[in-house]
Image (cartoon, rainbow, N blue to C red):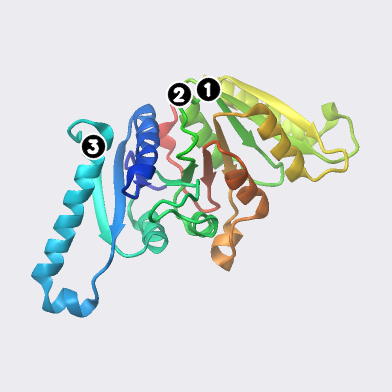
């Protein structure tokens, strides 16, 4: 099992337009009672510059960190507390974030999905690539639609796929924020709902979550010749939850492909925060009481 560092990382480019990214990241950090590493990047010097002008290279690093400190202090309007740790690194965002997800020991990482015009904004393809390659869960937020509460969490399930990792994290968010979880499954077979395996599986999950003290409900959706993806997306738009927890699939990470269309549609087709748990993402059982 992966050791829980009780910390998260947020990619927070500097600038007026991206102040809400930091504020949203701190909302989750405070609600989950974790440390947060706030990270930004600066233009990397060449290997020759680092070798022959090492003192100059160090000065660039120090100046970049000082500028970052000023940005964070101005945004939070107080001295930076000990639970907020700044990281400034050379290089490009996506490759470095992928490395951090593997070696940083973070419980999860936060990135903005608004794909705005601000400096260093991640594109849709950047975000899909990062999530597909990440070794830890990723929380995507939208800086233009800030979240002030987490009271309703939707977790789509598929009876053919594992749900344990999603439920562990669903329990963590529900317990910390006092939220209700809605388990949702789409049914496309012509049998009565009461006799469906989807309902039986969802009810087992419901009972397990209730035993953990989490308020939970179950919703079975009939597809009526529509795709499961469309039915689930329509339901999410209708219910407008405060958080969606979904699972990516291990084969995307190892095949080099991007995340699947359904996962991408939920991430980019909604303004709400979406928490993605990858196929090989390890969970932290010590978080569950």
Q: Is residue 1 above or below residue 204?
A: below
User: Residue 81, image x and y in percent?
Assistant: 20, 33
Q: CA distance from mark 1 to mark 3?
A: 30 Å
Read off the residue under disc 2.
177
Query: Are there few (<14), some (14-19), or many (20+) residues within 10 Å of tag 3?
Result: few
Q: Is residue 3 visible?
A: no
For the C terminus, the quadrant is: top left
Quadrant of residue 30 within the rendered picture: top left
Q: Is residue 57 left or right of residue 279?
A: left
Alpha carbon of mark 3 to alpha carbon of mark 2: how far? 27 Å
Q: Earlier in the sequence, mark 1 or mark 3?
A: 3
Q: Which numbered disc, 3 or 2, marks the residue closer to the eye?
A: 3
User: For the residue labelled by badge 2, is the local secondary structure a helix, a strand or a loop?
Assistant: helix
Q: Nearer the viewer, residue 82 or 74?
A: 74
Q: Which mark is residue 239?
A: none
Residue wearing tag 3: 74
Q: Nearer the viewer, residue 146 or 249?
A: 146
């Amino acid at each position: 099992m992966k050791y829980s560092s009780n910390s998260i990382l947020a990619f927070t480019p500097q600038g007026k337009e991206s102040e809400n990214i930091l504020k949203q990241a701190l909302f989750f950090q405070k609600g989950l009672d974790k440390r947060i590493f706030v990270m930004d990047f600066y233009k990397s010097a060449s290997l020759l510059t680092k070798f022959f002008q090492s003192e100059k290279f160090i000065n660039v690093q120090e100046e970049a960190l000082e500028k970052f400190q000023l940005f964070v202090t101005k945004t939070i309007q107080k001295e930076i507390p000990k639970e907020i740790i700044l990281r400034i690194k050379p290089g490009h965002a996506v490759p470095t974030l992928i490395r951090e997800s593997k070696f940083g020991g973070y419980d999860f990482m936060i990135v903005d999905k608004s794909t705005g015009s601000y400096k260093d904004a991640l594109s849709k393809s950047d975000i899909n690539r990062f999530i597909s390659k990440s070794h830890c869960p990723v929380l995507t937020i939208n800086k233009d639609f800030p979240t002030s509460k987490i009271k309703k969490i939707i977790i789509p399930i598929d009876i053919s796929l594992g749900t344990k990792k999603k439920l562990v994290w669903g329990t963590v968010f529900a317990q910390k924020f006092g939220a209700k979880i809605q388990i949702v499954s789409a049914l496309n077979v012509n049998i009565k709902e009461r006799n469906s395996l989807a309902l039986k599986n969802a009810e087992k999950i419901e009972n397990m979550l209730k035993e953990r003290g989490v308020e939970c409900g179950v919703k079975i959706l009939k597809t009526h010749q529509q795709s499961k993806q469309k039915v689930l997306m329509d339901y999410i738009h209708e219910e407008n939850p405060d958080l969606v927890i979904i699972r990516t699939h291990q084969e995307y990470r190892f095949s080099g492909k991007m995340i699947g269309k359904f996962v991408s549609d939920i991430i980019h087709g909604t303004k709400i925060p979406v928490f993605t748990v990858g196929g090989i993402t390890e969970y932290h059982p010590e978080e569950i009481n």
